[in-house]
Amino acid sequence: MITALANEQNIQETAPVIRFVVYGNPKHQKRHRTFRVGKTKQVDVNWDPSDTDKADFLSLAHQYRPEKPINGPVSLKVVCYFSRPKSHYRTGRHTGELRPDAPIWCATKPDGDNLLKFVLDALNGVYWTDDSRVVKACVAKLYDERPRTEIEVSEIVDDRAESVERQAGSTEQLPGLFKEHSHE
């Protein structure tokens, strides 16, 4: 089951930032399928197996959307938290305790680029006019007890070279975009 956390609108020096969380296992972009239908007149049909997942994701993110899609350059941060596998936990009398050598970063499938593509496609046309508007993107994959996807969207209003560092912010915010969910 997927649920969403309330939106936080923060006014920065340049543009509002939209932050929200979609709870549930992070979804990735699945490969499109093409097949032929019809006996006498064959037609090629393209099918996106992620369509239903994207619609579900968008329905939860829809309440946090901007008044109108962003038409300028967009910065996007995506942090995906996955459930830990059983092998990360101890056994015996310490059952349920996290192993000291359990990793924080999720270095397994799905690929980070497919997670990012899923978010780009799901929010396309609602948060931004076209996914080509996303000029800066950051994706991270971590483990946590509560699987979720954290999203941060902001418009880059000053696209001059000297403003890139100010707009980009620091990757030190990762892991986690939200303090209330971080491991600190």
Image: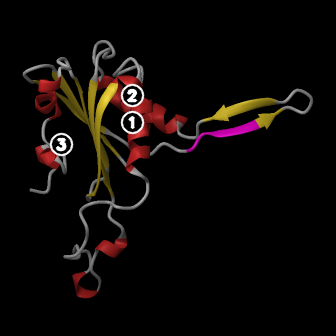
Q: Which residue is mark 2?
A: 123
Q: Which residue is mark 3?
A: 177
Residue 25 appearing in the image: no
Marks 1 and 2: in contact by CB < 8 Å? yes
Q: Identify the image quadrant of residue 158.
A: top left
Residue at which label 1 appears: 119
Residue 97 image offset from top left, x and y in percent: 22, 75
Q: Residue drawn 21% across and 22% down? A: 156
Q: Are marks 1 and 3 in contact (CB under 8 Å)?
A: no
Residue 109 higher or lower than 48, as above or below: below
Residue closest to the eye, 72 or 36: 72
Q: Residues within 10 Å of mark 2 (few under 14, many from 20)?
A: many
Task: Tell me, yes or no, if residue 85 can be seen here.
Answer: yes
Q: Looking at the figure, which quarter contains the C terminus?
A: bottom left
Q: Main secondary structure of the magenta part?
A: strand
Please provide percent x and percent y for residue 14: 11, 19
Q: Position of residue 51 (x, y in %)?
A: 54, 34
Residues in magenta, as a range: 31-35
Gap between marks 2 and 3, in whole Å?
A: 19 Å
Q: Is residue 121 magenta?
A: no
Please name the residue shown 38% across and 17% down the image: 129
The residue shown at (20%, 20%) is 159
Q: Earlier in the sequence, mark 1 or mark 3?
A: 1
Residue 135 badge = none
Type of the residue with mark 2: Leu
Is residue 10 found left or right of 146 in the rendered image? left
Under circle 1, the secondary element is helix
